[in-house]
Image: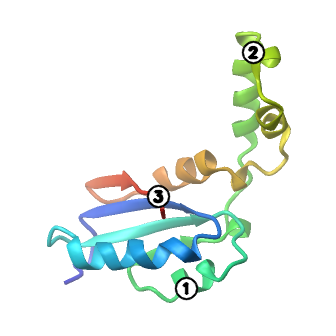
């Protein structure tokens, strides 16, 4: 039974999770603790059908990649910390590239940070699709 306002909101960063998202939704529908819940989902540019699947679910509030504002501070904060502690020589090339990535909205952390600002339930938890 869904109440008008959810008691708990689950924050989900979604990216091409079609193989797992069905299991997550089924699990929540089957085993939730008898309270109302809602999934707050920030999609990160999925192309596998998971976005279309989530759009059809009544317990999901969804933000597509293009609906979310650019997270200008995300990369700047990462670069600041790397510079502050002089970590450039210790970073794997993958992470060096990530600190220079233009669209941080595609990062898991950025998606979760966005969703935290959307919480209006008394409780929330982050949950991964897999």
Instruction: Tell me: 63 left or right of 67.
Output: left
**Which residue is painted at 69% across and 19% down in the image?**
81
Q: Assess whether mark 2 and mark 3 are in contact (beta carbons under 8 angstroms).
A: no
Q: Where is mark 2, residue-wise?
A: 87
When asked about the image quadrant of residue 79, the answer is top right
Q: What secondary structure is marked by label 3?
A: loop
Counting from the top left corner in percent of width and height, residue 113 is at 55, 47
Measure the alpha-carbon separation of dots 1 and 3: 16 Å
Counting from the top left corner in percent of width and height, residue 50 is at 59, 78
Q: What secondary structure is marked by label 1?
A: helix
Counting from the top left corner in percent of width and height, residue 101 is at 83, 44
**Which residue is painted at 19% across and 84% down in the image?**
1
Along the viewing direction, whichever of 97 and 57 lies nearer the viewer: 97
**Which residue is painted at 75% across and 36% down in the image?**
75
Measure the alpha-carbon separation of dots 3 and 2: 29 Å
First in sequence: mark 2 or mark 1?
1
Say the numbered circle drawn on residue 118. Answer: none
First in sequence: mark 3 or mark 2?
2
> From the viewer's perspective, is residue 116 above or below residue 76?
below
> From the viewer's perspective, is residue 114 above or below residue 16?
above
| Within-10-Å neighbours for mark 1: few <14, some 14–19, many 20+ | few
Q: Where is mark 1, residue-wise?
A: 53
Q: Where is mark 3, residue-wise?
A: 128
Along the viewing direction, whichever of 94 and 11 lies nearer the viewer: 94
> From the viewer's perspective, is residue 107 above or below residue 7?
above
């Amino acid at each position: 039974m869904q109440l008008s306002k959810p008691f708990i909101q689950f924050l989900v960063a979604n990216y091409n999770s079609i193989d797992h998202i069905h299991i997550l939704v089924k699990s929540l529908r089957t085993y939730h603790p008898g309270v109302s819940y809602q999934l707050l989902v920030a999609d990160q540019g999925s192309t596998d059908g998971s976005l279309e699947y989530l759009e059809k679910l009544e317990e999901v509030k969804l933000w597509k990649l293009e609906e979310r504002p650019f997270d200008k501070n995300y990369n700047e904060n990462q670069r600041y910390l790397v510079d502050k502690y002089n970590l450039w020589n210790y970073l794997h090339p993958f992470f060096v590239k990530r600190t220079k990535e233009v669209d941080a909205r595609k990062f898991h952390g950025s998606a979760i940070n966005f969703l935290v600002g959307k919480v209006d339930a008394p409780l929330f938890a982050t949950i991964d699709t897999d």
